[in-house]
Structures are given as C-alpha cells and as structure tokens.
Amino acid sequence: MGRAFNFSAGPAVMPEAVLRQAAAEMMDWQGSGMSVMEMSHRGKEFIGIYEQAQADLRELLAVPAHFQILFMQGGGLAENAIVPLNLSQGGAMDFVLTGSWSQKSLKEAGRYGTARVAASAQADGFTSLPDPATWQIGGDSRYVHICSNETIHGVEFHDLPDLTALGCAAPLVVDFSSHVASRPVDWSRVGLAFGGAQKNLGPAGLTLVIVREDLIGHALPHCPSAFDYKRVADNQSMYNTPPTYSIYIAGLVFQWLKANGGITAMQARNIAKAQLLYDFLDNSSFYVNKVAKNCRSRMNVPFFLRDESRNDAFLAGAKAANLLQLKGHKSVGGMRASIYNAMPLEGVQALVAYMREFEQTQA
C-alpha cells in the first residue's frame, strides 16, 4: 500500500515531490557538505535559498512592490499580538467574528488597544458570513481584521471585502493561514496578510507576513524588537535567526507550485476537489455539512454523521483504508477533511469512495 492520504488540518500534507527532494538533500545540500539545517543563516548558501524563496513567493502571489514579505516565527497566534503591536498605535481595532480563529484574534488584540466586534456569525454557529454591508466599523478604526478561512468551522471568504466601498479608510488585515496560495489575492483590498506555513506552504515554524510599506514603522514602544515589522524588514527577516529549515522547505513548495501551474491552476484543482466532496455530502442522507453554500471552505470541509454513535467505527474504518486525521476539532466534534493544495484529487476520490461504502454497510 502506498502513502496514506493525510487530511490533517495542520501541520498538513506536503507535496510528495518536495519530501523526496528534501530527503535527497538532507545530508548534503547541493554539494555544500552541509544539511540546510546546519547552515549559518548569514552564509551565502542560505542567503541564496532565502532570496529565491522570497522571489518565488512574490511571483506566485503577485505581491506588489510596495508590500514587504517578512519571514517570521510564532504562527498565527503570535501574529494576533504582533499585528496590534505594529498597527494599532494604541487605538481601536474592528474584528469580524466568523469562527474560533477570529475570536482568538479579537481577544488577544484587546491586550494592546480597544478591540471591537464589527460583525459576528456566532448566532448561527459560525455557519455563514456576515454581509459586509452590515459591518459596524468605527471611523477611528486602525484596521479591520478578518480570518478569510476558518479551519474549524469551515467557512471561507471567497472574495475579500472591499472596505473602500463600505466607506472605510482603515486597512484590511487578513489571517489567510489556511488558504494562502490556494487562490489569487486581490492586494488592492489588503493592508496586511499573515499566515502560518504549516497548512499550505510547508512545515510548522515559519510565519508569513505580507505588509504594505506605509503600515510599517508605527510599532508601540513596548513592541519587542524582534516583532517590530520595520526592524524585521530592514534586516531582511534576519534580525534574529530565522526558521531556516522551514524557509528552505517552503521554498521547495513554492517551486512545486510554479512547476504545477501556479496559483491559478491550484485554484482550479481546489474547486474541483471541494466540489466533489460537497456534492457527495449534499446528496447523502447519512452525512451532513452545515455551512451555507455560498461560503463553504475549499480547504477545510467539516461534516457530521447524522447518527454520531457511528463516529468511532467511521474513523477506524477510515484509518484501515489509509485515510488519516479525519476527526473533527474537539470544540465542534464530527469530522473534518482538510484538502489543501498538496492533497491530490485521488485522495478526495478515495475519501468519497470510502464514505459511500461506509454508508452502504451501515444501512
């Protein structure tokens, strides 16, 4: 039997070609006599890896020249503090609550300024998105925060909101941890986007921050030096030792993305994978997905067995079929299939085939 299909929400499935290349280069990277994880971050070998990774990412995501690409650490949870430390100037920030991650962002930001709820989908169990026309954004807002894909509840902004059309001059901050590189980004609507690498870009340890240059240089006095975006940018993400091996692996993922048609091709593949799974769920009386159809995540598909007494049997059978990490988050229960870029169509086909077979055996 070949490699299992890994539906983990993160750390998540990696492209097999990337894993094979990393394995081949583990002991000796391109004749250097060193593993990448042994290299000085200031040596010419790693500087070359870093510069290539950054250039490839800028090309892939079509990041404009007036945005800085920062390679940081701490994941999305750390950015929940680092963003307000850099952008709030001690003032008010507005948050759109669409699930667990935006809730965490709101709570953390409140430690550094006034964090307000502009809109919330909590009343319907985070199964829909609040219409931007209903958002209550203050005129004094330093920024508006959204999580554009909620991994736990499975809702996604398929289009980023246009704050200027809402009469709002504040920049949009986007936590795009779980769908970065799965679709194009309209940078004209974004002030800052951040995300952990461990879902679509590489292993845990690397945090990506893409920030408009005019938003840099306003950190609060008590912002730690290593988290000041201006200091990080001025030092090419090397003010402190960066997560070198994670950057290397992410760089290999960027090359894999380019070799496989880039972001537009990934988007088409992701739509096809998600459609296959959602179509099956919608036509089954045995399983159910509760998310509104207009905002279903293409990356994280939560679903439930209508008879949850069968959950353990479902998971045991899935594991026996080499379909791993399908248990839903503990806060919501049920099941969840994360189908990031590196999940092939064959993996989703295998999952649907298993789900159909399980349903038939339980009838």
Image (cartoon, grey):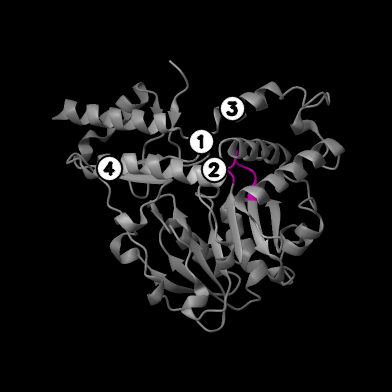
Disc 1 and disc 2 in contact, CB within 8 angstroms: yes
Per the model, the C-alpha gap separating discs 1 and 3 is 10 Å
Per the model, the C-alpha gap separating discs 2 and 4 is 24 Å
Please give the count of numbered marks on the rendered protein.
4
Q: Say what amino acid the circle numbered 4 marks.
A: Asp
Q: Earlier in the sequence, mark 3 or mark 4?
A: 3
Q: Which residue is mark 2?
A: 200
Determine the secondary structure under disc 4.
helix
Q: Say what amino acid the circle numbered 2 marks.
A: Asn
Closer to the camera in the image, 31 or 88: 31
Per the model, the C-alpha gap separating discs 3 and 4 is 30 Å
Q: Which residue is mark 3?
A: 17
- Using a 10 Å C-alpha cutoff, classify the residue at mark 2 as few (fewer than 14 neighbours), some (14 to 19) or many (20 or more): many
Per the model, the C-alpha gap separating discs 1 and 2 is 7 Å
Q: Which residue is mark 1?
A: 342
101 vs 332, left or right, is right
Q: Say what amino acid the circle numbered 1 marks.
A: Ala
- At a point 51% along the width and 34% down the height, the residue shown is 13
Per the model, the C-alpha gap separating discs 1 and 4 is 21 Å
125 vs 74, left or right, is left
64 vs 103, left or right, is right
Q: Earlier in the sequence, mark 1 or mark 4?
A: 4
- Using a 10 Å C-alpha cutoff, classify the residue at mark 1 as few (fewer than 14 neighbours), some (14 to 19) or many (20 or more): many
Q: Say what amino acid the circle numbered 3 marks.
A: Ala
Q: Earlier in the sequence, mark 2 or mark 4?
A: 2
What label sits on residue 279 in the rendered view? 4
- At a point 23% along the width and 26% down the height, the residue shown is 357
